Image (cartoon, helix red, strand yellow):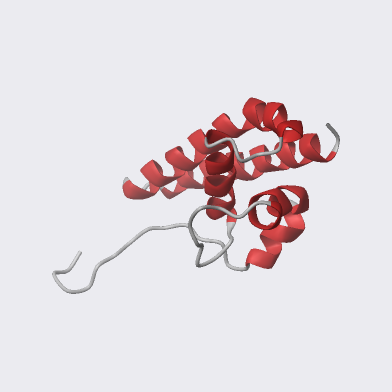
Amino acid sequence: MGKVLQVRVYAYTYDEADVRKAWPRLWSLAFEETKPGFPYEMAGVLELVRALDDLYQFGVMPEAFRAVVASGLPKVVKAVEDLQRHLADWNPQAANQASDRIEEGLGELERQVANP
C-alpha cells in the first residue's frame, strides 16, 4: 500500500431497490413503519441489518415481530461482524461466505415475518 494511494477492501449495496425487492417486509419495518434514530445515506443490506438491530435493541419494534426477529437476527448481526473482520483481514473468500450468511439469514427472517 502506498503512502498516498490507499487500498481498501469493503462491501456495499449497489442498488437499494434490490434490498427492497429481496426483503420487502423487513424493509418496510426498518425504513418505513418506524424511523431509525439516525439517517442513512443509503438503505442497503448492512444498513437494513443495523436498523433492525437498533429497532430490536431499543424496543421500537412491534411486538408481533419481536419474537421472530429475536430468533434470527443475532446470527445475521454476527455474520455482519464476521464480514467486517474478514474484509479488514483482506480475506475475500471468507467475506463472501459471510455475505452469503447475511443474505440467507435475512431471507429466513423475511419468510418468518411475512408468515408469523
Name the foreground residue: 87 vs 80. 80
In this picture, residue 7 sits left or right of residue 4: right
Q: Residue at x 72, y 32 (%)?
A: 63
113 or 100, which lies in front?
A: 113
Residue 93 pos. (x, y %): 47, 45
Q: Quadrant of the N terminus?
A: bottom left
Judged left or right of residue 44, residue 113 is right
Residue furthest out toward the right: 115
Foreground residue among 62 and 25: 62
Rendering coords of residue 86 (x, y %): 39, 43
The residue lying furthest to the left in this view is 3
Q: So how many labels did they put on this image? A: 0
> What residue is at 37 percent from the left and 58 percent from the top?
9
Quick check: can you spot residue 94?
no
106 in relation to 78, above or below: below
Identify the image quadrant of the C terminus.
top right
- Give percent across and percent down for residue 24: 76, 54
- Measured along the vertical axis of the image, is residue 109 above or below residue 7? above
Is 17 placed left or right of 101 in the picture?
right
